[in-house]
Amino acid sequence: MTTQSLALSENMECPLCLGEGKLKRTEVLDRLGVKDFARVAQLSAEEAFRLLQQKHTHDRRDAWARFESELARRTAEIEQRHRDELQTLGGRLKEFESAARVADERKALDVQRVRTELETKLRSGESQREDLNRRVEDYFREITQLLREKFELASE
């Protein structure tokens, strides 16, 4: 029923008011002791529609609540997985940094060892050179002295 037809059916000719139409349909039916089945059906339909709308709204809210709850749960799971992965990667990063430090220290020790060995060889080489130079000088002096003695002996 439309709003216009409801308004027209509200006022009706009534045998009680001599057709002046001043009584409403519900008042006439109430005076006659008759139920307005159309009105009862309309109100029942309106109530049923209201209840259906209310149920639909409630169901929709429940669906959104379930969706948001599931979304929050899955988001929390993903965040936890990422935190775990980040922690694992942080641990591996620390291991790599530690290994790099150990490698750097080992390299520094190797460089120091090689430097020490080379310095020792250099000192040894310098010592041998000095010894050889001293020997050569001693031999030159001895040769020079022997030559002098030879010239002295030859001149005598």
Image: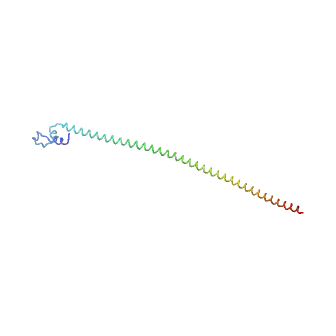
Tell me if 78 is positioned left or right of 95 in this view.
left
Q: Position of residue 123 (x, y in %)?
A: 71, 55
Q: Position of residue 2 (x, y in %)?
A: 20, 41
Q: Which quadrant of the figure has residue 48?
A: top left
Tell me if 5 is positioned left or right of 81 in this view.
left
Q: Quadrant of the N terminus?
A: top left
Looking at this view, is 144 or 42 the one in front? 144
Tell me if 96 is positioned left or right of 46 in this view.
right
Q: Quadrant of the C terminus?
A: bottom right
Which colour assignment does the render follow? rainbow
Looking at this view, is 31 or 10 the one in front? 10
Q: Position of residue 43 (x, y in %)?
A: 22, 39
Q: Position of residue 5 (x, y in %)?
A: 18, 41
Outermost front residue: 155
Counting the numbered discs, the total is 0
Looking at this view, is 96 or 142 the one in front? 142
Looking at this view, is 66 or 124 the one in front? 124
Q: Which quadrant of the figure has residue 124?
A: bottom right
Outermost left residue: 18
